[in-house]
Image: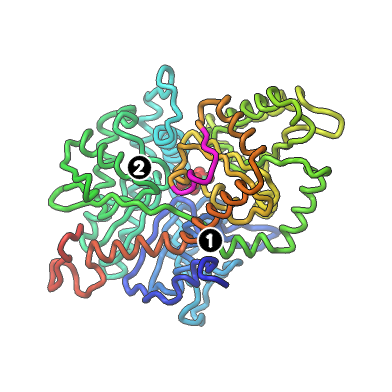
């Protein structure tokens, strides 16, 4: 195996053990507990963070992951452990640890926090999604939305605030249990108020908050009432580092705290001075576990699914356009189908020869905006298919399901992939497809994705709002000369292989080590002072 195809765990195998306790916080858990036929089942969660951290777990002396209980069985587990953590061996099929594991086993303590259902609904269904999500992805049409009324304010005051307090307390308890010193890695838009509270409770802590979604400039944030947005910014400034996928998001964050809080920033150093401390805005583009994905693409399971797809969608060696997404309005799925309709209208020779596989995972259907969006997806697909269907041919194959093996099979087989997001923190579909595709597929990539900063050069760039431009770009992709397609795909895959998920977490930990001097020994303010330039 070459260096470039190592998995994250292999990449970190030679790295020194991290001798500071690590406390991670995210809303989604690295595992989900379920009960089937009276039996408790544990399923490992997907996603970059789980992969990266589990890859590192063998090197961590002590790590706990605090997250939300989201199933009934999660709540049962939380109750059985009286809110405390459950030690798990995080293999492909996670199991409870029995204490006899070897030192380098990927053991992770998982602490499931159960909050009252009404609080969680306000926190998740009204404030985090849609309000914060829509603001940060630029999804509101300000002539009519959002309307911030009593419901929204209550969702903040009686949902987002108490849920953040509950999680901050859980994190602080874990830090205190470790002598008050730990590296705390917070994640995403659900927990903007946590850092400040944890710092107050545990002043010796080192805090970093990774924001996985876009960070827009100050104008986007004035949609929120001043008191709420200021609490959010003050909450985040409790960190030592606030981390993003791209330089643009990091710069926007600094401009926000300058403009909306009047704080002094340094755009060169990418820092803000706050209450006698320095807070750094940093950039770490997330990636994928290349080795694991390649292994999966070579599996029997994927081969079977590939055969099925080939039989159903490419019976005569025609062309396949693919998209793989959650049914999220930020993914711009409806405009993607409108662009595809234009493509067929303007290039009738493609009718009967080009199929569009839309592999979509229903998402957040408890949030009205998402349920409505799913309805609109169904309607536009029905219309386009009715217009262009022939015997034995429907142009769009819409599959509403979550099945990663089929998605990977489709990645290997497609001729072009459509990623036309209105805004996207990163977009891992783009990175996954270029690594495993075997037909020199062309990446059609929105300029408003984080991935565009790394892969735009090898992609056909899309304007997410301009459906004619998207139709033209799709045509360019589907008719591109074979050698150009191959060169672009190989170059894009090379970039992803060289920047695997393991690097993403290693780089953050190395920077935190440099910035805070945490690992050097005794407590801060004691014998050891932070190194020069440190932000602690
Ligand atoms: C994005 C967010 C994650 C979130 C995921 C799925 O990737 O950055 O924090 O977990 O979407 O959304 P869900 O609401 O289903 O957790």
Q: Is residue 487 visible?
A: yes
Residue that carries the numbered disc 1 in the rendered image: 289
Looking at the image, residue 369 sits to the left or right of residue 113; the answer is right
Q: Residue 535: x and y, percent?
A: 20, 57
Q: Residue 327: x and y, percent?
A: 58, 37
Residue that carries the numbered disc 2 in the rendered image: 249
Q: Which residues are magenta?
A: 454-462
Q: Mark 2, residues whose alpha carbon is within 10 Å: few (<14), some, or many (≥20)?
A: many
Q: Secondary structure at mark 2?
A: helix
- Residue 118 location, quadrant: top left
Q: Residue 369: x and y, percent?
A: 53, 29
Q: Is residue 79 visible?
A: no
Q: Is mark 1 within 8 Å of ligand 1?
A: no
Q: Residue at x 47, y 46 (%)?
A: 451
Say which mark, if any, is on residue 187: none
Quadrant containing the N terminus is: bottom right
> Could you tell me how far apart the alpha carbons at marks 1 and 2 are, in whole angstroms?
24 Å
Quadrant containing the C terminus is: bottom left
């Amino acid at each position: 195996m070459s260096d470039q195809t190592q998995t994250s765990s292999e990449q970190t195998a030679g790295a020194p053990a991290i001798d500071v306790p690590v406390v991670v916080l995210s809303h989604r858990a690295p595992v989900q507990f379920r009960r089937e036929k009276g039996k408790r089942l544990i399923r490992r969660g997907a996603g970059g963070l789980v992969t990266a951290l589990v890859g590192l777990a063998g090197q961590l002396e002590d790590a706990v992951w605090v997250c939300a209980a989201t199933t009934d069985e999660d709540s049962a587990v939380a109750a059985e452990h009286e809110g405390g953590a459950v030690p798990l061996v995080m293999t492909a099929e996670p199991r409870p640890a029995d204490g006899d594991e070897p030192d380098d086993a990927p053991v992770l303590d998982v602490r499931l926090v159960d909050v009252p259902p009404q609080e969680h609904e306000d926190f998740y269904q009204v404030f985090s999604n849609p309000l914060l999500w829509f603001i940060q992805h630029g999804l509101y049409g300000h002539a009519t939305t959002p309307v911030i009324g009593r419901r929204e304010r209550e969702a903040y005051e009686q949902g987002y605030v108490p849920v953040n307090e509950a999680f901050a307390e859980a994190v602080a308890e874990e830090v205190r249990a470790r002598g008050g010193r730990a590296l705390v890695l917070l994640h995403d838009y659900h927990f903007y108020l946590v850092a400040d509270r944890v710092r107050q409770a545990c002043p010796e802590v080192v805090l970093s908050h990774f924001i996985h979604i876009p960070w827009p400039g100050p104008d986007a944030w004035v949609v929120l009432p001043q008191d709420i947005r200021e609490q959010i910014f003050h909450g985040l400034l409790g960190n030592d580092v606030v981390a993003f996928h791209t330089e643009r998001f990091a710069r926007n964050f600094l401009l926000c705290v300058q403009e909306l809080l009047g704080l002094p920033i340094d755009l060169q150093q990418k820092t803000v001075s706050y209450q006698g401390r320095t807070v750094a805005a940093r950039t770490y583009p997330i990636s994928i576990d290349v080795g694991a994905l390649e292994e999966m693409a070579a599996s029997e399971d994927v081969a079977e699914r590939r055969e099925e797809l080939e039989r159903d969608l490419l019976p005569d060696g025609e062309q396949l356009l693919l998209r793989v997404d959650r049914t999220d309005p930020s993914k711009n799925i409806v405009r993607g189908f409108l662009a595809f309709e234009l493509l067929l209208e303007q290039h009738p020779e493609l009718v009967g020869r080009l199929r569009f596989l839309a592999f979509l995972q229903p998402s957040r259907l408890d949030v009205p905006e998402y349920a409505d969006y799913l309805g609109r997806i169904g309607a536009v697909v029905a219309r386009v298919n009715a217009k262009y269907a022939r015997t034995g041919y429907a142009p769009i194959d819409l599959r509403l399901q979550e099945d990663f093996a089929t998605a990977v099979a489709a990645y290997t087989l497609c001729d072009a992939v459509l990623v036309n997001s209105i805004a996207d923190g990163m977009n891992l579909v783009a990175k996954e497809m270029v690594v495993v595709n075997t037909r020199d597929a062309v990446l059609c990539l929105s300029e408003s994705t984080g991935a565009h900063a790394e892969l735009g050069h090898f992609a056909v760039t899309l304007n997410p709002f301009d459906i004619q431009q998207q139709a033209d770009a799709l045509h360019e992709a589907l008719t591109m000369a074979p050698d150009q397609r191959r060169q672009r795909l190989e170059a894009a895959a090379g970039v992803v292989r060289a920047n695997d998920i393991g690097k993403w977490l290693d780089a953050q930990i190395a920077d935190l080590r440099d910035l805070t001097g945490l690992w050097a020994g005794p407590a801060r303010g004691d014998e050891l002072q932070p190194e020069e330039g440190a932000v602690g």
